[in-house]
Image (cartoon, rainbow, N blue to C red):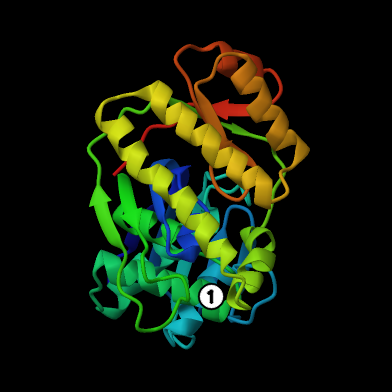
Amino acid sequence: MNTIETKAFARVGLLGNPSDIYGGKGISCTIDKGVELSLKKNHDLVLNSNYEGTEKHNTHYNGKHDLVKACINYLGLQNQPFEITYNSTIPKESGLAGSTAIIMAALRALQGFSGIKLSKYDMAELAMKIETNELGIACGPQDRYIISFQGIAFMDFAGKEFQKEADPFARIEPLDFNEVPFFIACSDLSKKSALVHNDLRNRFLRGENWIKEEMDKLASLCTEGKKCLANQDWKGLGKLMNKNFEFRKKYFTVDEADLEIIETALAEGALGAKLAGSGGAIAILYENDNAFNVLSEKFNCFKPKIVS
């Protein structure tokens, strides 16, 4: 068997998150930061990465390579002799779906290794099951679907709020808008998405129906946002991003550094700003470089390309 090489890219949520966890909608894209992974036959099971080192003969969860181990364990490949090496350029726990990118890259390689062929829909669902069932992570379908499909897409997750086995696939509408004027500013305050989502999710599952009603209001921004993208109405899109953030601030704690980035960006003329995911990375829509230049003096900022 030749070496299998795969990639998976970071995700930026432009609108709608976190309504995806509650059967809502989302507009997201994949960008040119990601995970590169290789799998090759070996005498032993070996796992390597640029930030978790090397580990041999072990698929028990111990904080090292747990994401890749979860894929191996879920697929029942613990006794297969291969070596997996992966490297990521996604800032760790920054809300850019770095964990899901590792899982997707691993699944793509393991799919090739085992000879199983799965659709992009099935790959997204499989990634979600692994994160939920193997690792106990409270997560929604947005990251798994956009990283599986890649590019930029409008996504409808109706019927998926309870995350049952019989749930329908999400409805994915690829959008042909690869030039969106946004940049990312990272606060370097890593945050685990499970810690962000678990409390509200548990309240929803206990029957607090108002949560679903509020999330549906948030999801409705995506329908408007799709029109803004089609018309390159960046001011309109920026207003929707700001509404999305105000909703987020109402129901979730926002770190001071994240709030500082957003307030500074808007004060410097940015059209809109919101959390790209669970926190630690901010998506900022701009029409000039003022906000980028000011924020770059204090934070890690970069202008990504949308990749498909």
Give the image quarter of residue 280: top right
Q: Is residue 250 above or below residue 213?
A: above
Left or right side of 236 for 302: right
Q: Nearer the viewer, residue 207 or 2?
A: 207
Q: Nearer the viewer, residue 195 or 39?
A: 195
Tell me the SS state at disc 1.
Answer: helix
| Amino acid found under the numbered disc labelled 1 | Thr
Q: How many marks?
A: 1
- In the image, residue 308 lies at what x, y percent? 28, 44
Q: Which residue is pictured at 53% across the width and 37% down the height?
A: 243
Q: Which residue is pictured at 33% across the width and 24% down the height?
A: 233
Q: Is residue 273 above or below residue 1?
A: above
Left or right side of 62 for 180: left
Residue 275 seen in the current view? no
- In the image, residue 304 lies at what x, y percent? 44, 31
Q: Which residue is pictured at 73% across the width and 49% down the height?
A: 253
- In the image, residue 9 lies at what x, y percent? 41, 49
Q: Is residue 144 above or below residue 272?
A: below
Residue 274 seen in the current view? yes
Give the image quarter of residue 281: top right
Q: Label 1 belongs to which residue?
A: 132
Q: Which residue is pictured at 37% across the width and 71% down the height?
A: 159
Q: Is residue 216 above or below residue 44?
A: above
Quadrant of image for the N terminus:
bottom left
- In the image, residue 144 lies at what x, y percent? 41, 61
Mark 1 neighbour class, 10 Å CA radius: few under 14, some 14 to 19, many 20 or more = some
